Image (spheres, helix red, strand yellow):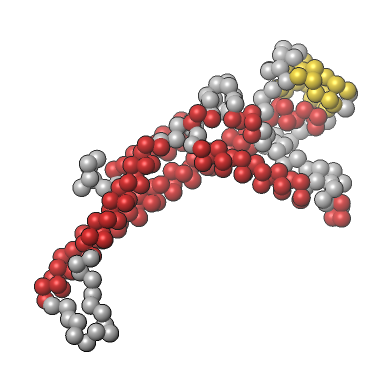
């Protein structure tokens, strides 16, 4: 037993957080305290196993004089169920930790794509954006921020080396492919009516420079402003 109850209780709390996050479609704040507590429990379990096994180690087979007496055999048989219990708890805690972090990483990937790959925008989103997530950055651990930056850099490399017209000229690719363009609802027209939800400054389009100020409406070429729609600056009207 540990001070928090049975071994594995802390890991169960971590999984409960993941389930609550999924049920509410909300990214909860990274629970650094609970994660560290589980890691300490892992070390404690490992120490307990080492202490149990240190007195039940088998003799050296190369030593003809080494024997395992009946008392040592009994002691070994007595502690093995306990060792198995501790080892099972260690493996379960590990699976729970991996599941918790994998769930958060997949959630962060979804948020990243929901803003069209605009990482600075994602890390500074106001409460009205990012699927209702307020202040995303404050909910992330430093390692998760590093993951997002590495993920964005990898996609940028892929986009540059594999999906640009310059890189794909030899394979018949004549136009850049926008990896971040939404595909859930294929566009029906080249032009689109949009309403400015948030000021985004001057944008250079096929029609020239347009100053997108909140509340104004425009008819523009979809490809020129699609990324602004994805990022929530504009909405189709």
Answer with left or right where residue 85 lies relative to residue 166: left
- At a point 35% along the width and 49% down the height, the residue shown is 93
Assign the C terminus to one quadrant of the image: top right
**Location of residue 15 (image quadrant):** top left
Q: Position of residue 136 (x, y in %)?
A: 53, 29
The answer to whether residue 193 shows anywhere in this view is yes
Vertical side of 181 occupied by 57: above or below:
below
Q: Extreme bottom residue here? A: 64
Q: 32 or 85, which lies in front?
A: 32
- At a point 26% along the width and 82% down the height, the residue shown is 61
**Location of residue 18 (image quadrant):** top left
**Location of residue 17 (image quadrant):** top left
Q: Position of residue 29 (x, y in %)?
A: 45, 32
- At a point 32% along the width and 54% down the height, the residue shown is 90
Q: 38 or 159, which lies in front?
A: 38
Vertical side of 2 occupied by 33: above or below:
above
Figure label count: 0
The answer to whether residue 237 shows anywhere in this view is no
Answer with left or right where residue 68 lies relative to residue 14: left
Q: Extreme left residue here? A: 71
Q: Extreme top residue here? A: 215
Answer with left or right where residue 26 lies relative to residue 230: left
Q: Position of residue 5 (x, y in %)?
A: 22, 42
Q: 49 or 216, which lies in front?
A: 49
């Amino acid at each position: 037993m540990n001070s928090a109850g049975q071994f594995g209780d802390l890991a169960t709390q971590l999984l409960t957080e993941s389930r609550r996050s999924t049920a509410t479609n909300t990214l909860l704040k990274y629970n650094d305290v609970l994660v560290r507590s589980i890691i300490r429990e892992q070390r404690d379990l490992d120490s307990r196993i080492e202490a149990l096994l240190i007195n039940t180690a088998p003799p050296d087979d190369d030593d003809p004089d080494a024997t395992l007496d009946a008392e040592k055999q009994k002691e070994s048989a007595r502690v093995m169920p306990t060792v198995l219990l501790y080892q099972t708890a260690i493996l379960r805690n590990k699976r729970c930790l991996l599941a918790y972090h994998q769930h958060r990483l997949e959630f962060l990937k979804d948020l990243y794509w929901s803003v069209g790959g605009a990482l600075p925008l994602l890390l500074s989103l106001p409460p009205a954006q990012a699927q209702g997530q307020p202040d995303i950055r404050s909910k992330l651990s430093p390692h998760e921020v590093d993951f997002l930056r590495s993920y964005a850099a990898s996609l940028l490399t892929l986009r540059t080396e594999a999906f640009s017209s310059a890189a794909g000229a030899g394979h018949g690719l004549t136009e850049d492919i926008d990896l971040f363009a939404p595909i859930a609802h294929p566009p029906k027209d080249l032009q689109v009516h949009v309403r400015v939800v948030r000021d985004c400054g001057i944008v250079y389009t096929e029609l020239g420079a347009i100053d997108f100020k909140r509340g104004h409406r425009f008819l523009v070429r979809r490809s020129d402003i699609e990324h602004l729609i994805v990022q929530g600056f504009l909405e189709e009207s």
